[in-house]
Image (tube, grey):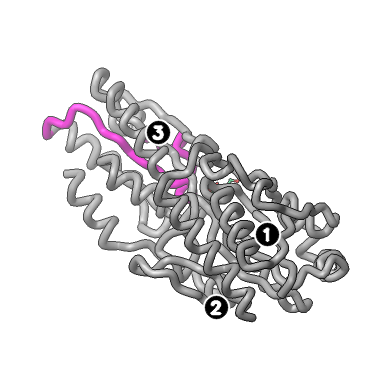
Amino acid sequence: LKRIAVMTSGGDSPGMNAAIRAVVRVAIHEGVEVWGIYNGYAGMYEDNMVKLESRSVGDILHRGGTFLGTARCEIFKTLEGRQKAAENLKRRGIEGVVIIGGDGSLTGAQLLSELGIAVVGLPGTIDNDIWGTDYTIGFDTAINTVVEAINKLRDTASSHGRVMVLEVMGRNSGWIAMTAGLAGGAEQILIPEMTVNLDDLCTKLSKSRDAGKKYSIVVVAEGVGSAVTIGEKIAKDTGLDTRVSVLGHIQRGGSPSVFDRILASTLAEHAVMALISGISNVLFGSKNGAVVAIDLVDAIGHKRTIDTSTFRLATLLSK
Ligand code: F6P
């Protein structure tokens, strides 16, 4: 194997830069040339790529986002689009690609492999919704950002005796809400994986106020619905002074945590070594603290569920 490429795709996540840096430096150490593809599949289709050296990835380890850029690309969903992208790689002699991204990006990777390009995936998304790995790159940084927001909301909620409703990201997954809710001590956590009954929620909030709770934090995963609507219902049904915050893309930025940098660097090393050994169509992840290779078709073919024991504990501790 002489030449590989690396790219980031889909929504960015903190730690993507750390992964790119590790791919480039491990590959060069192994005598393999590396190209960086700009803007994910869009750049692959447009032949927008550059040869990367060790120095090209200096000063990025601590930065959020992805210096290669990223995109969600419609044209790659067509066979013609994929064929043109694969031809661009072949013309440059690129035999394998490390693709860092979420579910959709890994599905694209599998399709690209059917056109004769070796692919290895790395789970890059704040959502932590990839099957087969305990953690995705960026999740830890994102939940730390959410917990920081909860801490700040607590200060002001406590001063005013309010209900604070906080909407967090995660698409259809409740991992961000559940984990940050546990770490931040939220009174109520609403996630799409568990039945949400808003009348029950209002009753519980009223009861805890009657039982002496001065204030409450309600964390809502965006997959459940709008926190604004939920906040309006709480205010109307309970009469409690209620405010709503939507954290939004603040969760996607920021310097990656130590955990995300180490996860990204370790998985990236495995990805490069796999391509060099002739292994492809796998996703590298972390399971019980060890690096694991997951078949790409399994990773994209299964929906990751939540860890119900974490949800149960969060509920128990919020009493
Ligand atoms: O997948 C990451 C994510 O941040 C989701 O949590 C969120 O639903 C979505 O991307 C937002 O997408 P965009 O950045 O395109 O608005």
Q: What element carries label 1?
A: strand
In the picture, the quarter occupied by the N terminus is bottom right
Vertical side of 236 occupied by 8: above or below:
below
Contact (CB < 8 A) between labels 1 and 3?
no
Sequence-wise, which precedes: disc 2 or disc 3?
Answer: 3
Q: In this view, does 248 lie to the left or right of 42?
A: left
Residue 32, horizontal then vertical, whole percent: 69, 67
Identify the residue shown where x is 51% and y is 73%. 302
Identify the mark nearer the N-term, 1 or 3. Answer: 1
* The stretch drawn in magenta includes residue 52: no
Within 8 Å: ligand 1 and the Cβ of disc 2?
Answer: no
Q: Residue 219 location, x and y as percent?
A: 36, 41
What span is colored magenta in the figure? 211-233
Distance, label 1 to label 2, CA atoms, is 19 Å
Label 2 amino acid? Answer: Asp
Q: Name the residue under label 2.
A: 295
Which of the pair 296/66 is nearer the observer? Answer: 66
Residue 200 appears in the rendering = no
